[in-house]
């Protein structure tokens, strides 16, 4: 799964091949097909795995009484950016991709995505109720904005320029996401 995540992160689903995954793992392509019926099934398993990691993080944050809901949302976004910069975050599927279609019928993926969305949705509502997140934004907009951080191209583009370290990039992306661009 680490190999698939890395290839999905760097190449995307359409350019990733099963041959590359098999070669990267050091097994025959036929052996890979014994475990995964298709490229879509392989990618879906990687997406399920990253959702499980995200859910484990959310469970840890849920138990942390030192952070409020807003800070927990920010922690999830930070993790997504760190995972992306580490090359371990699969790119989110395009609206019209065969992967998206496969994911929408994969119960493991859908169940975990709903669970993650519900947990983040609770924190979004709490952060809006406390006034730390804008009440003018529909919770769904906030949720999808947070999901978009997992595939945000800004950190990678700025990293390629070589002028900033990863922590600076993450802080700036979090600032634009949570604080906005307007001068205060």
Image: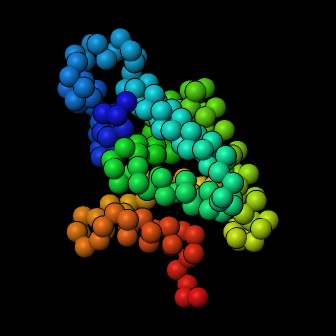
- Residue 160 falls in image quadrant: bottom left
Check the image and report above or below for 96 versus 84.
above
Q: Is residue 139 visible?
A: no
Spot the residue most to the right: 129
Residue at image x 76%, y 59%? 126
* Residue 30 left/right relative to 124: left
Check the image and report above or below for 125 versus 177.
above
* Residue 59 left/right relative to 99: right
Spot the residue most to the bottom: 184
Q: Please provide percent x and percent y for residue 179.
A: 57, 75
Q: Please provide percent x and percent y for residue 2.
A: 34, 34
The quadrant of the picture occupied by the C terminus is: bottom right
The quadrant of the picture occupied by the N terminus is: top left
Question: In the image shown, does 79 or 47 lie closer to the viewer?
Answer: 79
- Residue 164 falls in image quadrant: bottom left
Q: Please provide percent x and percent y for residue 62.
A: 67, 47
Residue at image x 31%, y 17%? 32
Q: Please provide percent x and percent y for residue 128.
A: 75, 65
Residue at image x 54%, y 68%? 177
């Amino acid at each position: 799964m680490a190999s698939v995540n890395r290839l999905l992160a760097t190449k995307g689903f359409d350019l990733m091949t099963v041959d590359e995954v098999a070669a990267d793992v050091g097994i025959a392509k036929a052996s890979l097909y014994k475990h995964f019926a298709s490229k879509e099934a392989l990618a879906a398993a990687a997406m399920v795995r990253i959702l499980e990691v995200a859910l484990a993080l959310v469970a840890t944050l849920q138990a942390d009484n030192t952070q409020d809901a807003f800070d927990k949302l920010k922690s999830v976004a930070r993790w997504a950016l760190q995972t992306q910069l580490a090359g371990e975050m699969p790119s989110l599927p395009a609206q019209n991709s065969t992967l998206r279609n496969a994911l929408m019928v994969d119960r493991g993926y859908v169940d975990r995505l709903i669970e993650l969305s519900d947990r983040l949705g609770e924190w979004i509502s709490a952060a809006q109720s406390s006034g730390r997140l804008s009440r003018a934004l529909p919770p769904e907009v906030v949720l999808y904005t947070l999901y978009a951080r997992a595939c945000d191209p800004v950190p990678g583009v700025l990293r390629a320029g070589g002028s900033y370290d990863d922590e600076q990039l993450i802080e700036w992306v979090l600032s634009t996401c949570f604080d906005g661009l307007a001068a205060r």
